[in-house]
Amino acid sequence: MAARLATDAGINVTVCSMVDPAQLKGDAARAYADWRSMGGDVVLWPLADDAPCDLVLDALLGTGIDREVGGQYRHAIAYLNRLDCPTLAIDIPSGLNADTGRVMGCAVQAAGTVTFVGLKRGMYTADGPDYCGHITFDDLDVPPEAAAEISAVAGELLDETVLGDLLTPRLHNSHKGHYGHLLAVGGIAGMSGAVHLCGEAALRSGAGRVTLATDPAHAAVINLARPELMVKAIAGTGDLEPLLNGEHILAVGPGLGAAGWSRELLECCIESPAPLVVDADGLNLLAARARQSAIRRDDWILTPHPAEAARLLGCEVADIQLDRVAAAKAIADRYGASVVLKGCGTVVAGPSGQYSICPLGNPGMATAGSGDVLTGVIAAMLCLGLASHDAARAGVVAHAWAGDLAAAEHGQIAMLASDITAQLGSVWRLSAG
């Protein structure tokens, strides 16, 4: 059909088939017959290396590919990727797994992808964004009930509207006590920056108060650059336990380290009934603890990157990246947690099997401290009263959106984690309309 429409528009079209058209069946056979009936011709693969063209439509393989591309299809994909013209993929770039976003040996590097009926989750995570280019979607007027079934399988694609849906305007008659008190636990000696970034991001995301529970070595100076942060020197569990009185939301992990001090503080936080976000070193210590005995909670959020996710599941990083959605869901099921699997196309999975993918964000966010900022934003969402899964979804969107605004101002190469924090004010202002 694309060839017929292009010809009707006066475009010179060459149609190349990977198989003898006489072998085609069903819709493909009918499309070939229609093309021939209007005088169109079909050439068989291979094409000459010097065949001139201005645009390629990639319709080599469908969405169901689940094994490595081989044979003549592998050669055809390599040929398309060598051409000095843009490629537009139909439904999904050939060679890209529609469910996992993994390149199956090789894949077409498309400048754009036109996809139909339902958005494929693999287009937005792992390798998907690098191969799909600009994505255009048409639901082809699928009935709402069918679209709902597709969405249940494909998961939710997060966007900026999530913030407006989940967060309500502040009442005039309110005070800081209405907006929660975050206790951020971390910052072993020499690692004060991580917990500082977490705390400042939480303040920028609406938490009413933030206290840093940190190593005495730097407790007296850690808030010099941000005096709004409160600080408690924590030499051991005896200093932390009095603070776990049910008045706080907890975030543990940024700069926590792996010493005995670190393990003891994590254990205190896990045993506390307070809602909890675990990140960074906290996740590595949690993984080591879980190897000794299983642990589950109902109201915590885990925010691993792929290496930390592999430790939580006792597998290899490559296993996580093979299917990021399945990995996030597996962690959520094992620990009873809402899980934020960070990376290209961050996945948010809940303990009931629900999941979302965030298409926002950019490679400039792959910088030291970015995860600590995310922890602070998510923890602030808990402070504002959101349930764990909603806090994870909102925090991921706000963090990624702020990252995109920071990249627009500084460029991806020059971005710092604190640049993301600096853009959170714009995010909240824009999300409020």
Image (cartoon, helix red, strand yellow):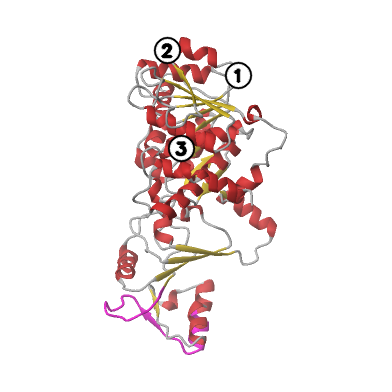
What residue is pinned by disc 2?
236
List x then y, in percent, for residue 195: 43, 29
User: In the image, is residue 146 above or below residue 255?
Assistant: below
Answer above or below: position of 151 versus 348: below
Viewer-side residue, 359 vs 404: 404
Upstream in sequence: badge 1 or badge 3: 1
Query: Where, by quadrant of the figure, is residue 60 drawn?
Result: bottom left
Answer above or below: position of 379 versus 239: below
- Helix, strand or loop at label 1? It is loop
* Horizontal arrangement in the rendering, residue 43 relative to residue 268 (left or right): left
- The mark found on residue 373 in the picture is 3
Q: Label 1, on which residue?
A: 246
Q: Which of 350 and 27 is in front in this view?
A: 350
* Residue at 63% across, 35% down: 386
Say which quarter of the image contains residue 342. Answer: top left
Residue furthest left as drawn: 49
Instruction: Determine the main secondary structure of the stretch shown in magenta.
Output: loop
The image quarter in which residue 368 lies: top left
Q: Which of 239 and 25 is in front in this view?
A: 239
Of residues 401 and 300, which is closer to you in this image? 401
Horizontal and vertical percent for residue 189? 34, 22
Q: Which portion, as a residue range, is magenta?
A: 32-56
Q: Distance between the residues labelled 2 and 3?
A: 25 Å
Q: Position of residue 183 (x, y in %)?
A: 52, 24
Q: Does the magenta stretch include residue 53?
A: yes
Q: What residue type is labelled 1?
A: Gly
| Residue found farthest to the right | 173
- Measure the alpha-carbon separation of dots 1 and 3: 24 Å
* Amino acid tagged 3: Val
Q: How far apart are marks 2 and 1 (CA)?
A: 19 Å
